[in-house]
Amino acid sequence: MESFKKQLRLSALIIMFLFVVITTLPYTLALQFNFYSKSCPNAENIVRQIVQRRVKADRTIPAALLRMHFHDCFVRGCDASILIDSTTNNQAEKDAGANGSVREYALIDQIKAALERACPKTVSCADIIALATRDSVALSGGPMYSVPTGRMDGLISRASEVNLPSPSFTVAQARQSFSARGLTLNDMVVLLGGGHTIGVAHCNFFQNRVTNFQNTGAPDRTMDKTLASKLRNLCASNPNANPSTFLDQNTSFVFDNEYYNQIKKNKGILQIDQELALDPLSSSMVSSLATNNNQFRKSFVNAIIKMGNIKGSGGGEIRKNCRRKN
């Protein structure tokens, strides 16, 4: 009898040990399509329905979710570390200067709350970001694609680790940043196009281009003069409010390849946008994408799934509240 009790205690210890290991090690298994088909079969429908309601009320939501997904994956991998709130002992990623433009945290909270009611402790916040982004892209006219899921939520979020590509980067500098995350030059060109075809930029990110480019005392000569004048007036109209403008000046709310046609006409808002059309490294890709919307859509799907596969590091769990560790 005593031997049997010892075996039970040993079995219990082994189970506890395995649970700790599984829930704290970085996840290394490949993501899977329909990961929640058995554990939470209605998960993707729940995400989609909430995103649909939000996008119906605000057409800028797809751009916001694309930005959140990108900013999350580029720091510690796609682990929802961008969602964690700062504490008195730690300044989290979301409070880094480069993440000041990231928004819609409340939307992720709403989706998480609905999923916790349906399937407690099952769907990760990281998967919610990926799925919500996918649905919002489709709702803005972009492709509907399958998202592999099974991500874990990260345990670490530090503002000091946020090192994102700058809007004033050259193509070579941006390429190096993307390459460090396992993404190619082609991935970079289509991901920037996907994010910027429906995105906006505030004056602080481009004002130097229309007033004092690289301390020349004059606007950037590579920008269309009419556009430069328009943007200069926009930024001067209410400097304290830091106004914004669409990165695609034509089909601003539609996910399409018009962004590439705009930058070919020297109407890139951010410096990196215009550099893509001018630099020999990327100009031929821009020309090809500008003439073929189907190619852009297919390339974007491949690139964003690849970006979404960037693994998190430093352990993982399924958070009950996306804003804090369990």
Image (tube, helix red, strand yellow):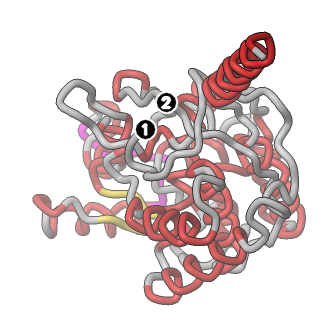
Please give left or right for residue 235 compared with residue 104 in the image: left
How crowded is the residue under tag 2: few (<14 C-alpha within 10 Å), some, or many (20+)?
many
Please give left or right for residue 206 compared with residue 181 in the image: left
Q: Which amino acid is tagged 1? A: Lys
Residue 33 in magenta stretch: no
Looking at marks 1 and 2 on the same chain, the residue that comes earlier in the sequence is marked by: 2
Q: Nearer the viewer, residue 229 or 20?
A: 20
Q: Quadrant of residue 275?
A: top right
Specify whether residue 169 is in view.
no
Please give left or right for residue 40 compared with residue 238 in the image: right
Q: Residue at x 36, y 49 (%)?
A: 206
Residue 316 position in % (x across, y down): 60, 32
Residue 15 position in % (x across, y down): 72, 25
Q: Nearer the viewer, residue 132 or 322?
A: 322
The answer to whether residue 125 is above or below residue 76 is below
Q: Residue at x 46, y 35 (%)?
A: 166
Which span is picked out in magenta?
217-224
Q: Residue at x 15, y 69 (%)?
A: 237
Disc ID at residue 325: 1
Residue highlighted by disc 2: 155
Residue 285 position in % (x across, y down): 81, 47
Residue 160 position in % (x across, y down): 35, 22
Q: Which amino acid is tagged 2? A: Leu
Q: Are marks 1 and 2 in contact (CB under 8 Å)?
A: yes
Specify whether residue 319 is in view.
yes
| Image quarter hosting the C terminus | top left
Q: Quadrant of residue 43?
A: bottom right
The secondary element bearing badge 2 is classed as loop
The answer to whether residue 192 is above or below residue 313 is below
Q: Nearer the viewer, residue 42 or 222?
A: 42
| Image quarter hosting the N terminus | top right
